[in-house]
Amino acid sequence: MYITPIQEIFTGNCKDNCVNIRGWVYRKRTSKKTIFLLIRDATGIIQTTSKKGTEAWKEAGKITIESSLKLSGTVKEDERAPGGYEITTSKIDIIGLSETFPIGKDQSEEFIRDIRHLWLRSRKMNLIMRIRSEVLRFMHTFFRERGFIEISPPMFITSACEGGATLFRTKYFDRDLYLTQSAQLYSEILIYSLEKIYTCAPSFRAEKSRTIRHLTEYWHIEPEWAFADMDDVMKIEEELVSYVCQETAEVCRRELEELGIDPKKLLQIRPPFPRITYKEAIERLHRKGFKVSWGEDMGYDEEKALAEDFNRPFFVHDYPKEIKAFYCKTYRDRPEIAMSVDLLVPRVGEITTGGAREDDRDELIKRIRESGLREEDYDWYIDMRRYGSVPHVGFGLGVERLLMWMLELDNIIDAIPFPRSIRRSYP
Ligand code: NSS
C-alpha cells in the first residue's frame, strides 16, 4: 500500500484521489457533525474530517492528541482548510493510542526543556532539524566541490587546543585523557598528505556559565589547508557562509517561511564581507562608550555592539597574540600581532575563529612557552614542523551558532536536538 507523504498532497497532484497517510494526531476539534483531526507526519500537517455516523467518526472519537494512526480518505480542495486541502476520511486505523499529552498550553521554557523527548515532536523543532540537516549537507558540498577531503578526528585527546580552562577530563583505563575541543591540531597533520581537509565533528567545552550561545557539546566544521594565507581564510569563510545562506533560502524556503523567517534576508548575504582590524574594533567600541582597552578580549556585549555598525557578517582580524591561542602565527614585522580572524554576525557575535598557524618550529616552541604550556605535551605537533613545513591556515565554525543566527533563534539550545550545558545533560 502506497503511503502518501502529507507534503505531496499540497502539490495539488492528489486532488480527488483516495490516499493513505500515516502519522500522529496534532490537533482535534469536534463539532456537531464532524470531527476535525489535524494529522502530522515528517513532511507536513493536513486537516481531515470524519462525518457523524461513519466508522471513521467512531475511531476519530476515541483517538487522542499524539496517537499514531493510519488514515485513508479522499483529498478535497477546500479554501477553509489550512494549506487549501483536506481529507474526507473513510477509514482510521489507530496504531498507538496516546495518553494525555503533557504539552498543551503550558510551553514555559523550563517545562519544555524537562520534556525535550516530547518537545522534539513540535513543529518548530521539526522544521529546525530539517534545516540543520540541509545546512550540514551544504557545508559538505561546499568543501567537497573545492577539493577538500573529509577526515574523522579523534574525540579522546592528550592535550589542549583551546586552553585548559574548558577541557573535560575523562578516565581512560589507567590514565586520564580529555575530550576534544577542536580537531585542528590533528587536522594539521593531515594537510601534509591531503593538502586540503575538513572535519565535521563534535567539540566539547567545559563551559561553566550558562549563556544563550554556549553549549558544552557542539558541532564544529573545521577546514585546514596548506599553502594559504589570511586572505584565503577570509575568502573561503565568506564564500561558505554566503553559499549556505543562498542554498538554504532556495531549498528550505517553505520551512523558513513557516518559522517566520524571510528567505530574502538570507539571499542578501553575499561576499565580500567587511573586514576590520582588532585595533579598529577597539576604536569603534571606544566611540560607543565601551571601556575595553587594547590587549583585552571582546565579550558578548562588545561583539553585539560592533555588529550594529554592519548589520551583516563581518571580520575582525589581527588580534594581540596574548588573547589568541599558542598555535597562531604572528607577523614577522609585528610580533605582537597574531594572524587570527573571527567572523562576527549580528545578535550572536562570533561564529568562526581561524587564521594562519605557526609553521616555524622555533617560533612555535617560543609561543608554547610564553603561553605557559608544557613543550612535552605538544611533541608531535612541534615535530611536524621539522619535515617540510608549509604556511597553512584553517578555521572552526560552530554549526549551532550559525543556525542561531540564520534562524533567528533566541537560544543556541534550539539549534541542536539534545543540548548539553552545565545544568542539562538529560535526556
Ligand atoms: O575556540 S574557537 O574559537 N577556535 C577553535 O576551536 C579553533 N581551533 C578552530 C580552528 O581554527 N580549527 O572555536 C571555534 C568556533 C567559535 O567561533 C564558535 O562558533 C564555536 O566554535 N564555539 C562554540 N559553539 C557553541 N558552544 C561553545 N561552547 C562554543 N565554543 C566555541
Image (cartoon, rainbow, N blue to C red):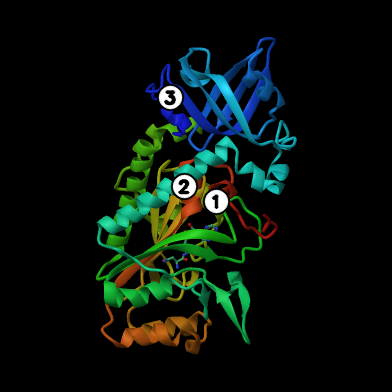
- The residue closer to the viewer here, 422 or 71, is 71
Question: Label 1 sits on what residue type?
Answer: Ile
Left or right? Give the position of 393 relative to 94.
Answer: left
Look at the numbered discs 1 and 3 and tell me whether their residues touch, using CB distance below 8 Å.
no
| Residue at mark 1 | 416
Q: CA distance from mark 1 to mark 2?
A: 8 Å
Classed neighbour count for the residue bearing mark 1: other residues with Cα under 10 Å, few (<14), some (14–19), many (≥20): many
Q: Earlier in the sequence, mark 1 or mark 2?
A: 2
Disc nearest the viewer among 1 and 3: 3
Q: Residue at x 46, y 60 (%)?
A: 220
Ligand 1 within 8 Å of the CB at mark 1:
no
The amino acid at mark 2 is Arg
Label 1 element class: loop
Q: Is mark 3 within 8 Å of ligand 1?
A: no
- Evaluate if marks 3 and 2 touch, with contact meaning CB atoms under 8 Å apart: no
**Residue 16 vs residue 120, the one in the foreground:** 16
Mark 2 neighbour density, 10 Å: few (under 14) some (14–19) many (20 or more): many
Q: Amino acid at mark 3?
A: Phe
Measured in 3D between alpha carbons, the distance from the residue under mark 3 to the one under mark 2, in whole angstroms, is: 23 Å
**Mark 3 — residue?**
10
Disc 2 designates what residue?
Answer: 132
Q: Residue at x 44, y 70 (%)?
A: 183
Question: Which SS class for mark 3?
Answer: loop
Q: Does mark 2's beta carbon lie closer than 8 Å to ligand 1? A: no
Image coordinates of residue 189 in percent, x first then y, are: 36, 77
Q: Is residue 144 visible?
A: yes
Above or below, 229 relative to 36: below
Q: Are marks 1 and 2 in contact (CB under 8 Å)?
A: yes
| 63 w.r.t. 180: above or below | above
